[in-house]
Each structure stands twice: as C-alpha cells, then as structure tokens.
Amino acid sequence: MKHCTDSKNCRRFYGHGIPRVKLEDIAGKLIVVEGADGSGRSTQIARLVDWLETNGHPTVQVGLKRSTLVSSELEKAQDGNILSRTTLSLFYATDFADQLENLILPALKAGFIVLADRYIYTLMARDMVRGMDEKWLKNVYGIAPVPDSVFYLSVEPEELVQRNLSKNATLDYWESGMDLGLSRDVFDSFLKYQTLMQETFRKLQKTYDFDIVDASRSTDSITKELRKKIGALLEEK
C-alpha cells in the first residue's frame, strides 16, 4: 500500500473506500505531515501554508480532533483519563471520517491542497501500541484516500521530552502512554511510549511507503527538504 506518486492515475482508497465517491474526479492534492508532539510538525505546516498560498495554491488544513461532530466530546472524554482503548479508537475514527466527508474530499474536489496535520498513520500507530488488531484497523481506515505525499518527522524520544517540557513545562497524559501502565513515572513512561510509537511508525512505513524526515535538524533545513519534494509533486502533470 504505497502513497500516490502518479497523480490521478493512481487515485485510490486504502481499502473499501466510500460508496459513490470517485477519486478520479479529484483535482487537488493531499499532503500529510506526521510526527509526535514536539517534532516541529505544526511549525512546518504553517510554513508550507505560507509558501503554497504565496505561490498561488489555495490550501485547507485538517488534523486530529477538528471534527465539529465529536471533537469537543473527545476532548472532554480524554480529560478524565479513563477511556478504554476501543472507545478512544472509535472516537478518533469518527473524528477522521467526519472530516474526510465534510472537509477533505470537498476541498480536494475543488482543487485545493489539503495539508493534514497527522492522518490515519498516527491513529493506527497509537492503537497498535495499545494492542489493537492491525487487520481490524486497516479495515476501519479503508475509507481513507491514499495521499499524494506523506512525511514523518522523526525525532528521538529523549529529544522529544526536552522539547515538550520546554514548550509546555509538562508532559501530556496520553502522549506519555500513561494509560498503558508502562511506568508510574510520567517521564519514564513518555520515553517508553514514544519509543514504541517510533518503532510502530517504522513498521507502518514498510507498508505505506512514506518519507521519514530527520527532524532533529534545523527548522530551515527541514522546510527546504519539504518544499523541494512538494514542489516536485506539484510540477507533475
């Protein structure tokens, strides 16, 4: 299951897709930026938006927990730190499906470049680390269109800890995997959880063939690499 590299000629869903939706009618591009909190993902997406729109490419941004259908309920449910792995998984799957139907596909059909601040890969990796069945997850996310480009910003867990602490002065419960019982210490749990996430992403990369970007480098060098690769994509006929 590789991401799309030949524009309309390889437009497809990862699985069963959505009834009556014809991807060959899509004129836009779907570009995904993946990475843990602290990987520089949001900064790079903001830079890409400025660059693309300056060069005449209208953009739309999507991401996790941005659905008007369930995002507020998901936020409230996570605050209690008591969600089961299945409930958490289904919440995020619903959030994705709603954005896909009401934001992603309409924007792509209208010719926009859709920039996704994480996509199904983060959702699958989180669930797989929590013991969910990979085959079941592939079926759930069989509705997802194959993106034109996917970039995973890779940063070692030890560096992620420092970045998150310097930014927020704390570590997030879920991003530390505290629900998994890896350690009673949030710092130690974060390191173990993010190591598992990184290993799972590398496993997914073998299946989905996305680009792994070394995000421990300077912000400018990462931006330069992303612009070069996306620029080449936009030049394809």
Image (cartoon, rainbow, N blue to C red):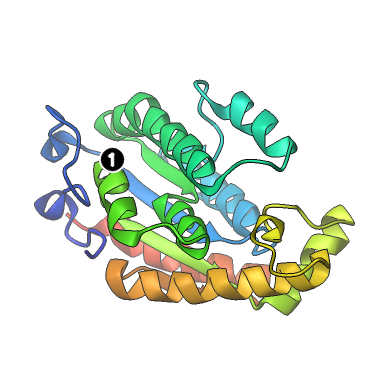
Residue 3 x/y as whole percent: 26, 61
Give the camera-side residue of 31 and 76: 76
Identified by mark 1, the residue type is Gly
Q: Nearer the viewer, residue 190 or 165?
A: 190
Q: Quadrant of the rendered structure where residue 221 is?
A: bottom right
Residue 224: give x, y in percent of width and height. Answer: 53, 69
Total labels drawn: 1
Of residues 12 and 189, which is closer to you in this image? 189
What residue is pinned by disc 1? Answer: 28
54 sits left or right of 149 in the view: right
* Image quarter (top left, top right, bottom left or bottom right) of the N terminus: bottom left
Which residue shows up at 71% across the image and 43% down it? 81
Q: Is residue 158 left or right of residue 45?
A: right
Q: Residues within 10 Å of mark 1 (few under 14, many from 20)?
A: many
Residue at 22 percent across and 52 percent down: it is 14
The residue that appears at 69% across and 63% down in the rendered structure is: 181
Question: Where is the C terminus found, in terms of image quarters?
Answer: bottom left
Judged from the image, the secondary structure of the residue bearing numbered disc 1 is: loop
97 with respect to 79 (left or right): left
The residue at the point 68 percent across, 52 percent down is 174
Comparing 44 with 147, the one in front is 147
> Horizontally, is 228 left or right of 63 in the view?
left
